[in-house]
């Protein structure tokens, strides 16, 4: 009996000591994540030396080498069956040339007849154009807008588009044509801004029209709201007259009808070029113990848009910010291991390539997981976590918004997030995009969800400098980035250590 009691005491002491060691390792790991480290990484990845990290470029090779060097420094290993940090991918993609926009029988010139990119309507099928006067929710609910283009005549083309556009997207509307009939001169000046290829020249024209560059960027960025789902084109009064068949739009009797099918259709044709690329996913690895065949993937894409002519598309927020989080979390786990931590599940730190080309890197990883003898338990994906939205409320809020994007059925994820005590690292977790089909598809988490694997994307929202040369490192909010990175680390720890 005495021997049994002594054995229980020894086991109790051993488990207590082990738990204390784990808690200490966890605390030290969390504290190792700092805004200064994140800033250093982003400034490197989004530097001119990296050239925008376009697929097939020297810049993306330098970026991948930088990530590998960091993994080696932190003693992060690689997946045994991969025999190195690189997962090589050969892939083919289609790239579109400059689109040709045809309205009726007129071939329109960009930045002269229209402004914008008709991404969502490019193809060989013409789209009907519907003039809308009544844009209320009650009215739009009862009209068919699926695969339609709408024309709006408005004295403010920069209106807040969220409410209207979110409804139009749900209704299947593909594009919005905006026109201020009374501001032909302003349209021409706007066209000159978009036509400028030199950054300084473009900024000068913005100041002349809007007073200051930041105001211009905010207004112009508003025109791009969800442009990957619905195209916004600003058309000249002359083009709008051709659409309506009314020469003097100022006398157009807009009160007579709430909506009207126009006599002309719109066609956006785009020649497609077929290209072959070679690139690499960069994968770090810490092997687990009891459940080592199961892996927790912590991911971010490290590619961006490369060069646009002579302009570097730096991609600081998109997505040097997410990669910095992955690298910093890898270092945090390295710190924990040094302090005696032993993970139950294995961990993959994934910097995916070719996300901008169609999630190619993550799709390849998911497809080849079996050959690497990996069974993914969950993917935690970071994309654009460095800046928030351009709203006054968000910019002035002390507790910043973080979108959590996942499927509605992932109750384990929500329970774990809601149970976390963030303290000084508090964030406003926003679940409004949970279950949203399009939000579930626009980053690498989509590749996992498509295969039935639990996945979540952390995202701080879109801003006016998204996919422009102005997405630069000095504009990121590194204090909030630190909070987001710590949140992802803490969540990953729960998945790594859960039975």
Image (cartoon, rainbow, N blue to C red):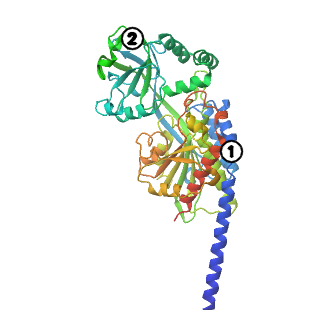
Judged by depth in the image, the label closer to the viewer, 1 or 2, is 2
Q: Earlier in the sequence, mark 1 or mark 2?
A: 1
What residue is at 41 percent from the left and 10 percent from the top?
238
Where residue 123 sits, quadrant-wise, is top left
- Above/below status of 255 relative to 343: above
Q: Seen in the image, is 373 located left or right of residue 435?
A: right
Single out the residue that lies furthest toward the front.
255
- Above/below status of 368 relative to 199: below
Q: Is residue 78 visible?
A: no
Tell me how far mark 1 sits from mark 2, CA to CA: 54 Å
Viewer-nearest residue: 481 or 140: 140
- Mark number for residue 250? 2
Viewer-nearest residue: 158 or 329: 158
Residue 331 in the image, given as x and y percentages of width and height? 66, 51
Pointer 1 residue? 35
Viewer-nearest residue: 249 or 104: 249
- Mark number for residue 384? none
Residue 253 in the image, given as x and y percentages of width and height? 32, 14
Q: Seen in the image, is 242 located left or right of residue 364?
A: left
Residue 427 in the image, given as x and y percentages of width and height? 58, 48
The secondary element bearing badge 2 is classed as helix
Q: Is residue 279 visible?
A: yes
Single out the residue that lies furthest toward the top.
247
Where residue 206 sits, quadrant-wise, is top right
């Amino acid at each position: 009996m005495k021997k049994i009691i002594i054995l229980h005491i020894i086991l109790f002491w051993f488990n207590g000591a082990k738990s204390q060691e784990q808690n200490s390792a966890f605390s030290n790991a969390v504290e190792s994540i700092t805004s200064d480290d994140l800033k250093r990484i982003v400034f490197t990845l989004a530097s001119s030396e990296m050239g925008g990290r376009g697929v097939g470029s020297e810049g993306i090779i330098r970026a991948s080498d930088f990530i590998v060097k960091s993994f080696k420094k932190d003693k992060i290993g690689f997946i045994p069956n991969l025999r190195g940090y690189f997962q090589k991918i050969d892939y083919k993609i289609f790239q579109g040339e400059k689109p040709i926009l045809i309205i009726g029988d007129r071939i329109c010139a960009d930045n002269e007849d229209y402004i914008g990119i008709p991404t969502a309507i490019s193809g060989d099928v013409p789209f009907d154009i519907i003039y809308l006067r009544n844009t209320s929710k009650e009215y739009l609910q009862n009209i068919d807008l699926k695969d339609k283009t709408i024309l709006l005549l408005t004295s403010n083309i920069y209106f807040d588009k969220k409410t209207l556009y979110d409804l139009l997207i749900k209704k299947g509307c593909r594009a919005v044509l905006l026109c201020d009939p009374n501001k032909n001169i302003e349209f021409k000046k706007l066209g000159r801004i978009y036509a400028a290829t030199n950054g300084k020249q473009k900024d000068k024209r913005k100041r002349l029209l809007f007073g200051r560059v930041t105001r211009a960027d905010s207004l112009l960025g508003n025109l791009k709201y969800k442009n990957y789902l619905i195209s916004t084109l600003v058309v000249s009064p002359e083009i709008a007259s051709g659409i309506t068949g009314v020469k003097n739009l100022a006398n157009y009797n807009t009160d007579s009808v709430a909506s009207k099918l126009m006599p002309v259709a719109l066609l956006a044709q785009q020649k497609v070029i077929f290209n072959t690329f070679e690139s690499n996913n960069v994968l770090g690895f810490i092997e687990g113990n009891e459940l080592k065949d199961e892996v927790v993937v912590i991911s971010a894409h490290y590619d961006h848009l490369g060069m646009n002519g002579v302009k570097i598309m730096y991609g600081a927020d998109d997505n040097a910010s997410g990669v910095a989080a992955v690298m910093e979390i890898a270092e945090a786990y390295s710190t924990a291991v040094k302090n005696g931590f032993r993970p139950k599940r294995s961990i993959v730190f994934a910097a995916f390539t070719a996300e901008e080309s169609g999630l190619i890197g993550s799709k390849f990883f998911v497809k080849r997981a079996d050959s690497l003898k990996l069974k993914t338990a969950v993917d935690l994906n970071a994309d654009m976590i460095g800046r928030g939205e351009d709203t006054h409320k968000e910019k002035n809020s002390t507790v910043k918004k973080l979108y959590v994007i996942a499927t509605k059925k992932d109750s384990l994820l929500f329970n774990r997030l809601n149970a976390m005590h963030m303290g000084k690292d508090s964030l406003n977790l926003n679940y409004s995009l949970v279950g949203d089909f399009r939000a579930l598809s626009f980053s690498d988490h989509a590749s996992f969800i498509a295969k039935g694997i639990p996945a979540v994307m952390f995202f701080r929202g879109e801003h006016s400098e998204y996919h422009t040369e102005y997405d630069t490192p000095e504009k990121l909010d590194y204090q909030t980035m630190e909070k987001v990175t710590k949140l992802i680390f803490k969540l990953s720890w729960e998945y790594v250590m859960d039975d």
